[in-house]
Image (tube, rainbow, N blue to C red):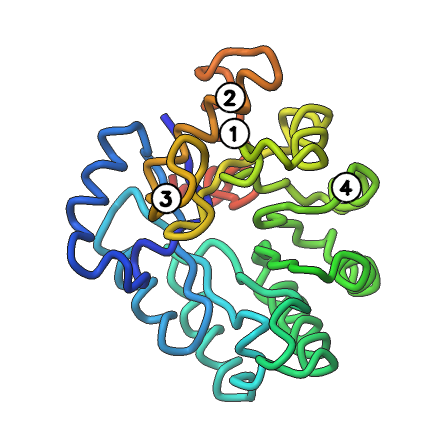
Amino acid sequence: MFFNTHSHVDTGRQFAADRAEVIERALAMGVSRLMVIGFHKDAIPVSLAFARQHDWAYAAVGIHPTEAEEWNQETADLLRQAAADPKVRAIGEIGLDYYWKDRAPFDLQREVFRQQIRLAKELGLPIVIHDRDAHADVVKILEEEHAEEVGGIMHCFAGDWEMAQRCMALGFALGIGGTVTYKNNATGQEVARRAPLESLVLETDDPYLAPVPMRGKRNEPGYVRYVAEFLAELRGISVEEVAAATYRNAVRVLRLQEDGAD
């Protein structure tokens, strides 16, 4: 059974008309654990409510880099309050996004990123990292802020093998999603093949980045099965082995066994 560590099925407007059916399909495709991501102020209570509603679901809460202008003391207090719920397993997704140049100033993104890492360390929670076109600065900040104290997940990892090694050295799992299945993604496939299996977790980032054979369509949380099948073929192992290992990895990174949450 699959642990999908990154889904937006709770808030994605693309699921407004058939969210219940999408969730049923995910369960039927083998998803037994799911983490939804409350990535801005209005999404946080929705994600937390979703996790509370479904005993197999968890939530991460944080301020996405493109929403960095939301960050203030009130927002920090909101995260602290949400994180008191045992269903909240991580702070995220947080990080840097240099692709959308008009969303939030990069210097502000960097400061908010640092503040949220420090908050996660205060709360004793792992972090889920968003990194788009900002590899060097993301790793630099993780290292400078000693993010290895909490670890976490490099969501939709898009760096090269050298970056992967630095992230794994900090105790981060690499999030493997639909992009690994794209035929022009040789770098991502190299990382997914070379990284120790105990450093990988599965995700979809639905409704975005649907894997082959669904590329170009709306992504769904159940499509994590296609990611697992591709990863199994890439590494020359069974889908069952991929599912079991990545499930254990997610449980470990999100500390579900230590406190009896699972």
Does the CB distance between marks 1 and 3 fall below 8 Å?
Answer: no
User: How crowded is the residue under tag 4: few (<14 C-alpha within 10 Å), some, or many (20+)?
Assistant: some
Kind of residue at badge 1: Thr
- Label 2 residue SS: helix
Does the CB distance between marks 1 and 2 fall below 8 Å?
Answer: yes
The residues bearing labels 2 and 4 have C-alpha atoms spaced at a distance of 21 Å
Q: Nearer the viewer, residue 258 or 112?
A: 112
On the rendered structure, is 222 left or right of 146? left
Does 39 appear above or below 185?
below
Q: Nearer the viewer, residue 126 or 23?
A: 23
Circle on res. 43: none
User: How crowded is the residue under tag 3: few (<14 C-alpha within 10 Å), some, or many (20+)?
Assistant: many
Does 249 appear above or below 89?
above
Q: How many marks?
A: 4
- Label 3 residue SS: strand
Q: Earlier in the sequence, mark 3 or mark 2?
A: 3
The residues bearing labels 1 and 2 have C-alpha atoms spaced at a distance of 6 Å
Circle on res. 34: 3
Circle on res. 160: 4
Circle on res. 246: 1
Does the CB distance between marks 3 and 2 fall below 8 Å?
Answer: no
The residues bearing labels 3 and 2 have C-alpha atoms spaced at a distance of 16 Å
- In the picture of the structure, the residue carrying the numbered disc 2 is 242
Q: Earlier in the sequence, mark 2 or mark 4?
A: 4
The residues bearing labels 4 and 1 have C-alpha atoms spaced at a distance of 20 Å
Kind of residue at badge 2: Val
